Amino acid sequence: MRRQAAPGPRALAYRYAAATTLAAAVFAVDAFTHLGSAVAVLYVLVLIIVADIASRHAIQAFAVGCVGLTLFAFVYGHGVDVMVEPGLRLLFSLSAILATTVIVLQRHADRLTVESQAELLDVTSDAIYLSDAIGRIAYWNKGAETLYGWSFDEAWGANAHALLATRFPEPRDAIAATLRQTGEWQGELTQRTRAGQTLYLFSRWRRRPDGTEGGGTTLETNTDITARRQADEALKDSERRYRTIFETLAVAIWEHDLRPVKEALDALRAEGVTDLAMYLAQNPDFVTRTRSLIRVTDVNGTALKLMGVATKEDFFTRLDDFLPEDDPTFPAFLLALNRNVESHTAETTIRTRQGELLRVIVAFNFPPGAPLDRVQASVLNITERVKAQEALQHTRSQLDHALRAAMLGEVSASIAHEINQPLAAITAHAAAGQRWLNRPEPDLDEVRASLAQAGAAATRASEVVRRVRTLMTQVEPEKTLLPVNAVVEEALHLLRNEMAAQGIVLAAALGAEDSRIEVDRILLQQVLINLMANAMQAMQATPPGARRLGVRTHAVPDEVIIEVCDTGPGFSEQVAQKAFEPFFTTKAQGMGLGLAMCRTIVTAHGGEIAIAAPEQGMGGKLRLSLPAVPAAES
Ligand code: ADP
């Protein structure tokens, strides 16, 4: 089926001239000689000359012409008297011409069909070629020309797979056997183009046997899948890289299927639950139930080591298997999931296979739009750090206590020391006054003078007390210029562990980003720690899911405001009146010095501290204001 170009007008003209000349020659011999045979039969050669090149109409015209010439030559030679023998010869010639015309027209129709089918093969972008029994190319479509770079004429007759350096996915014998048995084969292979580029192709073969052993032709249709293969390879490569990172990361990672939890939360919403925090606080069994729904789907090597498990198959199957029952952080996790946040971090405790409790920071990532069936949690073991911090905190609080005791002792000793003298003076003046009165004739002037001196001594004593107290409580702050949020964040950091241990959710909104204050960092931290510690103590009776500590900063003209609020019971009117008085406490173990100290320190910084009106749904709220340092000075 070698593809042929359409004949040009010149080729057509030559053929027609040849056919016409032959027709004229046959006619001349037929009409003007007396050769006894059926010369007119030779008209079939005229038809054969134009058969593969002429149009249907031209073939018909030549046929009519030949018949006409035959009849004319007959009449010309024999007249209209039909004799038997020449008549039979005429009939014989006409039959041959007509039979040839029918065959030529039939072949012409077949040729048109084949040509239009071949054109169809050229329309597809797939590379299609036909090879004979020994692999030589017999047909090569436009797609093959474009894809491989060889034209039909260049490819024709070459061995297809040698030309294209084909590499097969299985041995050639196996492919040949499949072709023999089923007549078809398909698979992925690589071939090289004329320019030397390697292509990945999906190849479909169809064999058409010709009845001989090993004979017949094979039609191969090849679809270029190079781009897809490269994309697949790139994807696999990135998956491999991701796997390697996942497995070798120093952080433990496990994946969870959170879909059932999300469904449970969605169901709650559908039931009309709007305040999820409240619902969770009131329905601890819902929390327990949802926890048990979480399956672990994958873990990395570091996680196995951390949890003391040998293989992935042996790893815990559910979150419940290693999260202690009294874990207080799960409600906060549910709230985060419900809010569709992009990440959530919690500090919690987990139990290893050997039963050891570990303190960990767990960070969940919920990329927007990603399915919840494989949510990753990165887990950082901070057990040692927490132990060190706890030891440090313990030492600090012991020291603090000792310092306070020492300070109290010092205050009382100083007061005692300082007022001893005025007290002695008062005693002496009182005794003298008494003696003057006890005289037979009391000297009232002396009595008056003694009393006046005793009064003056008492005044001095109270002055001494005030001075000593001022002296002892007066702070000499070492002021530095600091961003207010940095100080607040440091204080929050110091209390993070305790908050996590008590299941307190922190709601920090630090709005005063650019505000700076001139403060003694340690003292202001002491104030904030006191306020937050009070807030945490106030929430001891609040159910775990509802414990929230609000810390806010914001700037107003010339000032920075810091607010600390909680979900405890708040201040009663009586407590609010006395809360800042030294030694006022409502706690069994309280010293009643915290808020007093806060006020002293804040006042020393030119600021103010007060109990603020509680917000909706919240308990106690303390508000302190400090002078802001204008930007130009900072
Ligand atoms: P202490 O904490 O040692 O009792 P404080 O001066 O810190 O001393 O507090 C005085 C009192 O003020 C507390 O005993 C408590 O009754 C009340 N109080 C302080 N903060 C809060 C708060 N956030 N919510 C309710 N009451 C509080």
Image: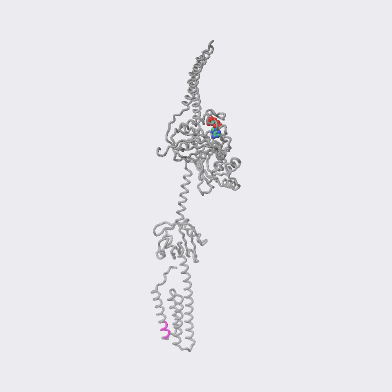
Q: State how the image is colored.
A: one colour
Q: Determine the image quadrant of residue 278.
A: top right
Q: Relative to 49, is 522 above or below?
A: above
Is 177 or 261 nearer to us in this picture?
261
Report ligand 1 position as a quadrant: top right
Q: Relative to 417, is 585 above or below?
A: below
In the rendered image, which quarter contains the N terminus? bottom left
| The furthest residue to the top | 440
Counting the numbered discs, the total is 0
Q: Which residue does the image show at 46% across and 28% down from the upper left?
A: 474
Q: Is residue 479 left or right of residue 264?
A: left
In the rendered image, which quarter contains the C terminus? top left
Where residue 398 sits in the image (x, y, percent)?
50, 28
Q: Determine the image quadrant of residue 50.
A: bottom left
Q: Relative to 436, is 508 above or below?
A: below
Whether residue 352 appears in this view of the structure is: no
Q: Is residue 285 left or right of residue 139?
A: right
Is 242 or 437 nearer to us in this picture?
437
Q: Which residue does the image show at 39% across and 60% down from the upper left?
A: 194
Where residue 314 sits in the image (x, y, percent)?
55, 42
Q: Which secondary structure is most common in the magenta stretch? A: helix
Where residue 411 sits in the image (x, y, percent)?
49, 24
| Residue 16 counted in the magenta span | no
Whether residue 510 appears in this view of the structure is: yes
Is 283 or 443 nearer to us in this picture?
443
Where residue 609 sits in the image (x, y, percent)?
50, 34
Is 145 or 138 nearer to us in this picture?
145
Magenta-tinted stretch: 26-31
Q: Relative to 48, is 275 above or below?
A: above
